Amino acid sequence: MMFDFLVDLTGSPILAGTIQSLLPLFLFILPFALFAVYLERKVSAHMQDRLGPMRTGWHGWIQTVADILKLIQKEDIVATDNDKFLFNLAPIVVFVGSYAAFAAIPFSSMFIGTEMDLGIFYIVAVTGLVVAGILMAGWASNNKYSLLGSMRSVAQIISYEIPTILVMLSIVMISGTMSLHTLSEQQTGYAWNWYIFGGPGSELSKFLFIPSMVVGFVIIYISTLAEVNRTPFDIPEAESELVSGYHTEYSGMKFAMFFLAEYANMFAVSAIVVALFLGGYQSPIGYLGDLIGAKWMIPIEQFSWFTIKGVFFVFVQMWLRWTLPRLRVDQLMAVSWKYLIPIAFVNLIIIGLITLL
Amino acid sequence: MKEYFGNIYSALATIFIGMKITFKHMFVPSVTIQYPDVKPQLPERERNRLYVNMDDCIGCDQCSRACPVSCIEIETTKSLPGEDLGKTSNGKKKALWVTNFTIDFAKCCYCQLCVFPCPTDCIYMTDVYEFSEWDRDKLIYDFATLTPDERQEKRDNLAKFNAEKEAEKLKAASEPKPEIKKDQSEEK
């Protein structure tokens, strides 16, 4: 595994742990955020028959680098009536919350932060920290729009956590494990072993699972979309009502940290959906490394499969964003409490009954 | 109950309809015009920066008088009897040196009123509309073709010619002066 390799390389478990904890940030999240911001602009532009950034580099490909340089140069404004301590702490808490989730996400069979047995549970718990950070930002800003935005955000994230967890629970009931690594290993082989197609095996129960799994997939996708505050669930930062919600008062690098956390979160929830339902890092069509007998290629292929799947779902999130208008607050609550939660419950009971068979 | 499932169905169905539309639009050619590289087709009667073809200008000052914001300034100097200034393209004989012809585009309102009175059609609209400057003084365009030295020379020539004429007049006037005075007094 990655950790053992790093211990061999550096000779010190502490150094190895530090390197491994920083790897996803520099190897994955920062490049991904740069790419995702560019993708977002291009997708939105082309969906509206525009071109998007075109002037920095070929088709504007270094636009985000230019934006980051601009954000670094900007003044870091802290208003006099802000609660300084909480105001400065909030972006860090939000970023740590979304970054900590990456510790349990299996990028490939060789590269996973920690192989903890409570992977899903850990992710649900640690992303709860984001809620605290957002509330902190809204409260410390001393601005009515920020406070309203953060209140809405907290209400929304807490309501949508329930259907997410219920669907995760149904997967845990089938697979009997909470470790995302084990879950991904169970879905090995070909695409029909993925949990969206009923999971591994070929008994009757596998085929009975399929409709419930598809319903569960749709529910978890909608509710994770709401958890990362993306359109159509972007009422916490509704531009037309609340300026820009809880990060109205932030500028410069602190704003960039919120931004980075948002894009890291987008990938994190896509990765969870992929790991639970779509085989995680497993290839749908078998590995080239197996075919030509080069075992060392398999983790690299797995990493690319995982990235492709994750980025595809990030793309779908963007696609939805530029398709659907924002929900009203009451509609948002109705979707969660009247539709997603009851359906997720019924789904959970059906899956429980099938597993008893 | 029926309404409940109907809502779920219509929500999902309309989402997919919307997604289909936006996905189609990803492949529709964009309407953006990459402005500095590609210029848009301007309307037929567009009005832009003026140009004066000084070869045809006879210095008649009609454009300056037509201008509602007085942005055209013309100074002309009479030519001496022996000088040949050439002809305009439509056959008019030029009689004046145009020693100063400036248009202040910071003032110009692009009304095109100066274009119509011109007897030789030498002032007209071009298709240039990008001529912003950092310094407002740079928007004062000088169209006169003579160099500053030449302009001064023409002015000096005329002044000299006038002075000579005046001197001649004085000379001529000094002799038959009494007669005229007499006539004048008789008329009185």
Image: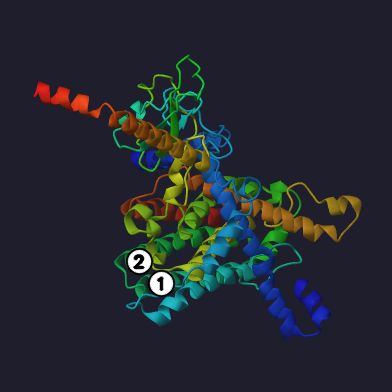
Which is more toward the observer, B70 or A279? Answer: B70
Image coords of residue B141 (percent x, y)? 46, 40
The residue singled out by tag 2 in the image is: A146
Q: Residue furthest left?
A: B188
Residue at the spot 51% in from the left edge and 21% down from the top edge: B86
Which image quadrant is residue B98 in? top left
Q: Nearer the viewer, residue A153 or A176?
A: A153
2 and 1 marks on the same chain: yes
Tell me if I can see residue A124 in this picture.
no
Three-letter code for the amino acid on which mark 1 is drawn = Ala
Badge 2 vs badge 1, beta-carbon distance below 8 Å: yes
At horizontal 53% and vertical 38% (from top left) the residue drawn is B35
Given residues A203 and B174, the one toward you in this image is B174
Residue A230, percent from left and from top: 47, 54
Instruction: Please say if A221 is above or below A145.
Output: above
Helix, strand or loop at disc 2? helix
Tell me: A285 left or right of B67.
right
The CA distance from mark 2 to mark 1 is 8 Å
Q: State left or right for residue A190 relative to residue B85.
A: right
Q: Chain of mark 1?
A: A
Q: Earlier in the sequence, mark 2 or mark 1?
A: 1
Marking on residue A318: none
